[in-house]
Image (tube, grey):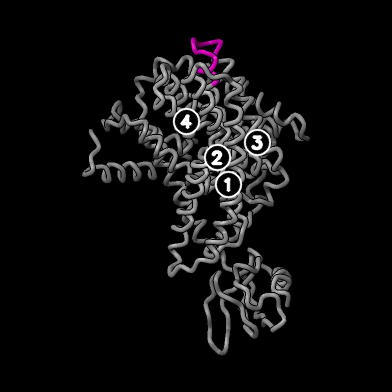
Amino acid sequence: MNLTIENILLVGSLLLFISLMAGKTSYKFGVPTLLLFLAIGMLAGSDGIGGINFDNPQMAQFIGIISLNFILFSGGLDTNWAGVKPILKEGIVLSTVGVLLTAISLGTFVYFITDFTIYESMLLGSIVSSTDAAAVFSILRSKNLALKTNLRPTLELESGSNDPMAYVLTLAFLTLVVNQDQSLVSIIPMFFQQMLVGGLAGFGFGKLSKYIINKIKLDFEGLYPVLVIALMFITFSATDFVGGNGFLAIYICAVFLGNQDLIHKKTILKMYDGLAWLMQIVLFLTLGLLVFPKQIIPYMGVGLLISIFLIIVARPVGVFLSLIFFKMKLRRRFYISWVGLRGAVPIVFATYPLLAGIDKANMIFNIVFFISVSSVLIQGTTLSIVAKWLHVALPEKVKKLTANDLLLTENPKAQMKEITVTANCFAVNKKIVELGFPRNAIIAMIIRNDSYITPNGTTEIQADDTLIVLADKLEVFEEVNKTLQI
């Protein structure tokens, strides 16, 4: 079947519906949902029962970049800074030095077992060097794993922030493969430019985005998530335009915004959670359609060797060497090594050699695809089991809720109190979003001059207002009083 304008919506919606229904039952059998999305795409493709002819790496790459924007931004919004701060150094080292070491060790292995040149080998190593944010975020959260001593924030920070490093390495070694006359030293300035400009741009756009979101006055609440989408794409494209790493920029921007008080933040978070899932499904379906299973079969042997080496040797080498100067229990290091999931991101990166037209591009793409599938199948299905073996899992009942978890909870507040704002209070003439109000308390109503006002983030508190505050516990009202400076 050839996709046309007339049937693309029908086919797309049917595939989406089938993916959702398959995902609903997948965990009864211990199969990661993302792998099913990929399998459905393959079954619908030209080699499958669907017979859809999709052989457009450029379109797949475009869809992949758009999807990764949403997935990384959503992951950044959900990143709790209080949980990440204690392990920030470990996370940064894992997402940079760890990725580099993994790429080098795997590239060296590929060089010795294949007829690839050293640069082609390093290109393959770079493409699969990072853990996949979509796979890690979705599998950890859908399995609802509670892990000990900041282990989960470490894994989510690494997976959310290491794609930029793999992206830069992929571009660097692709440049060396295409331009044989260039030396390895020539790509070093590009690496530092990408990372430095990307990091600074992410923080700068984060502060600018917060100002715009809280200062602009839109007529409808539903427009605020649309505004954030626009700011996300501006951050990515503007950073890329000036030579920085757009993926790093949007992740840092999102982490900053996720830990700030924003107008209609709950609406924004809920929408991004749904969009991230949609983009994960679309991304895996697209990549499933792009691959031709018949072309993978000749490379399954070498792909299996590379995949096993990556899981058993290259990933642990990257983790243990990069964390050698940090105090961390051995079982935690082993678990971090095991959660080295490869998913859609390496497959997206593998489209770059295809579009560059290098000799072994098709072979690289098929090997990467096999590595990603085997990684999700082997590691993704055993995360809970390995966590129990290594004694790093906690019972679900002791799992801590983050500030965003509390914000999104639908549980009603159990305590209510009326608080009168006097003329000398700090809160007078301040917008609610500017107060830094406790996350487990809300201002449900404001009584002003015998009238009742339903507040939102832009509502200004005035002298003599009576605030009807709802909270989870009576102790929270002490924090409320400090915030308002009653």
Cα distance, mark 4 to mark 3? 33 Å
| Residue at mark 4 | 349
At x 49%, y 61%, the residue is 267
Q: Main secondary structure of the magenta part?
A: helix
Disc 3 from disc 2: Cα separation: 41 Å
SS at mark 3 in the image: helix
Residue 194 visible = yes
Which label's residue is closer to the chain start, 4 or 2? 2
Distance between the alpha carbons at the discs numbered 2 and 1 = 8 Å
**Residue 248 disc label:** none
Does residue 150 lie above or below 214 as drawn? above
Contact flag, marks 4 and 1 (Cβ < 8 Å):
no
In this view of the protein, can residue 312 be seen by the observer? no
Mark 1 = which residue? 201
Instruction: Quickly name the residue at label 2.
Output: 244
Q: Residues within 10 Å of mark 4 (few under 14, many from 20)?
A: many
Which quarter shows the C terminus? bottom right
Q: Secondary structure at mark 4?
A: helix
Q: Residue 75, image x and y in percent? A: 55, 46
Q: Tell me the magenta residue range.
A: 111-122
Tell me the residue that label 3 is attached to: 388
Name the residue rendered at 59%, 16% in the picture: 108
The amino acid marked with disc number 3 is: Lys
4 or 3: mark nearer the eye: 4
Looking at marks 2 and 1 on the same chain, the residue that comes earlier in the sequence is marked by: 1
Q: Residues within 10 Å of mark 3 (few under 14, many from 20)?
A: few
Residue nearest the viewer, comparing 203 with 340 = 203
